[in-house]
Image (cartoon, coloured by chain):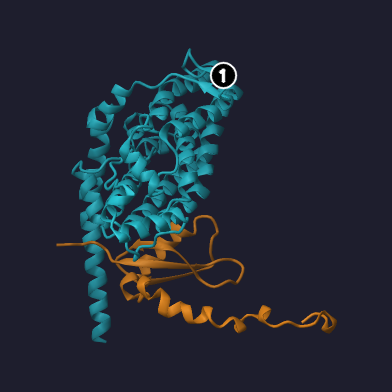
């Protein structure tokens, strides 16, 4: 998902827990929300910083593939809509950074860890957006997959994270609908336009399935995160739900899911489908995806080129405060 | 030089005359910029008609460990709730 393969720290059996840790787990089991000043195990705090940080970085880096098309949107209306969507993503990044900051890490520290390659963002944003139809596919599939993950996270145990998710989910369905609207227009357009829509689906289908991360049914990290309720569903559950929801939407468009083995399984009440190429996923995570270098360069450039603005505005504010104090 | 902007808490009053409500936080160099940024981030969909910002450092919060001494006393004073008093039905609506 936007947070993939987050390593979770802790993972103790109940009889190894301190009384404090037991009481903490009991609070979570009762469905209580944990708030910033409450006592929490160090592992819970660290795992959350990693997960929320990765989620925030994904929102911010996720602006890049879409920003690529703002100046090239086919109509003024589409351009305004895409601008609004990309602005939302910046806002989502902010909500999440703010939630992470309540855990005692600063915004600048998080940014610096991303730029130093010590924190990750979602693999999906290392794929290029080659045509306008890709903007449709990103909204429809990538935001669709994000919603699958984020809706249950509204019930996550950490209060500030859950509240950020509520806000994000409210805005996210606009994103998915605008993507699907682009796909509808293209699928109903000329043969060339329809072919572009199909091509975008072909390229984004498996990377979208990868967003949920590899199967984690046997992962100790996932088990710990689920015990802490900072992960609510397994990766496989969410991926299955995503496929089941998306296949009829593709059919409505008259587009074909690029999976010859996709077939309805009456018994399980869901589709059987092919797994993505997980070796590709690990390569992308390692930094060898089509756009990893480009994305990091863009973030580093923005951070370095913006330094004088950050410093200048701070200096100005301090000068004015000093002048005000002297009056 | 460290140039991390200070953190501000943002409060918004919605359309219907309710109290300002905490909606989140953001970084900004000054109060004026904090209001500008809050408008851009927290009122993109008509969420509010008024914004307050306050430096996060200026907020004093109660400690979670004080929950007992702070809030228990009100638990014991059930007579503060109108349902404590039995009023006969014959009296009519009160």
Please say whether residue A301 is visible from this viewpoint.
no
As displayed, is residue A323 above or below residue A315? below
Q: Which residue is mark 1?
A: A264
* Chain shown in orange: B
Provide residue A43's location: percent of width, then percent of height: 27, 51
Taking depth in this image into account, of A212 and A64 the one nearest to the observer is: A212
Q: Residue furthest right?
A: B90
Taking depth in this image into account, of A42 and B59 the one nearest to the observer is: A42
The picture quadrant where one finds residue A280 is: top left
Quadrant of the image containing the N terminus of chain A: top left
Q: Residue furthest bottom?
A: A327
Q: Residue furthest left?
A: B1
The picture quadrant where one finds residue B61 is: bottom left
Colour representing chain A: cyan
Quadrant of the image containing the C terminus of chain A: bottom left
Provide residue A36's location: percent of width, then percent of height: 35, 63
* Structural crowding at the residue carrying mark 1, measured as other residues with C-alpha within 10 Å and reported as few (<14), some (14–19) or many (≥20): few
Provide residue A192's location: percent of width, then percent of height: 51, 17
Residue B86 in the figure: left or right of residue A308: right
As displayed, is residue A82 above or below residue A159? above
Q: Residue furthest front?
A: A15
């Amino acid at each position: 998902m936007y947070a993939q393969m987050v390593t979770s720290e802790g993972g103790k059996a109940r009889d190894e827990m301190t009384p404090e840790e037991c009481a903490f787990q009991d609070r979570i089991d009762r469905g209580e929300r944990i708030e910033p000043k409450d006592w929490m195990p160090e592992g819970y705090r660290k795992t959350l910083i990693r997960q929320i940080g990765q989620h925030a970085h994904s929102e911010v880096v996720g602006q890049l593939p879409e920003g690529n098309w703002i100046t090239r949107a086919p109509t003024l209306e589409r351009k305004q809509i895409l601008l609004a969507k990309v602005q939302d993503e910046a806002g989502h990044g902010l909500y999440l950074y703010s939630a992470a900051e309540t855990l005692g890490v600063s915004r600048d520290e998080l940014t610096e860890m991303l730029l130093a390659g010590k924190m990750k963002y979602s693999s999906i944003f290392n794929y290029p957006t080659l045509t306008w139809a890709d903007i449709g596919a990103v909204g429809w599939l990538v935001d669709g997959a994000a919603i699958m993950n984020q809706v249950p996270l509204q019930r996550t145990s950490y209060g500030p994270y859950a509240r950020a998710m509520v806000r994000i989910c409210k805005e996210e369905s606009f994103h998915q609908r605008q993507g699907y609207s682009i796909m509808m227009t293209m699928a109903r357009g000329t043969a060339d336009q329809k072919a572009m829509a199909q091509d975008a689906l072909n390229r984004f289908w498996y990377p979208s399935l990868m967003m949920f991360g590899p199967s984690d049914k046997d992962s100790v990290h996932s088990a710990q995160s689920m015990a802490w309720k900072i992960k609510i569903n397994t990766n496989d559950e969410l991926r299955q739900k995503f496929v089941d929801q998306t296949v009829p939407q593709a059919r409505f468009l008259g587009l074909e899911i690029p999976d010859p083995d996709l077939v309805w399984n009456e018994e399980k009440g869901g589709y059987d489908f092919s797994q993505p190429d997980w070796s590709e996923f690990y390569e992308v995570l390692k930094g060898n995806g089509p756009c990893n270098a480009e994305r990091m360069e863009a973030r580093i450039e923005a951070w370095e080129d913006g330094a004088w603005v950050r410093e200048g505005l701070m200096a100005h504010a301090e000068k004015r405060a000093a002048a005000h104090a002297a009056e | 030089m460290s140039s991390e902007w200070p953190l501000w808490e943002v409060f918004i009053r919605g359309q219907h005359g309710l109290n300002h409500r905490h909606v989140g936080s953001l970084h900004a160099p000054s109060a004026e910029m904090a209001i500008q940024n809050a408008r851009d981030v927290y009122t993109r969909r008509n969420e509010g008609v008024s914004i307050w910002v306050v430096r996060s450092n200026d907020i004093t919060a109660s400690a979670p460990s004080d929950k007992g001494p702070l809030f228990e006393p009100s638990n014991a004073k059930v007579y503060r709730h109108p349902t404590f008093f039995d009023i006969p039905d014959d009296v009519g609506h009160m």
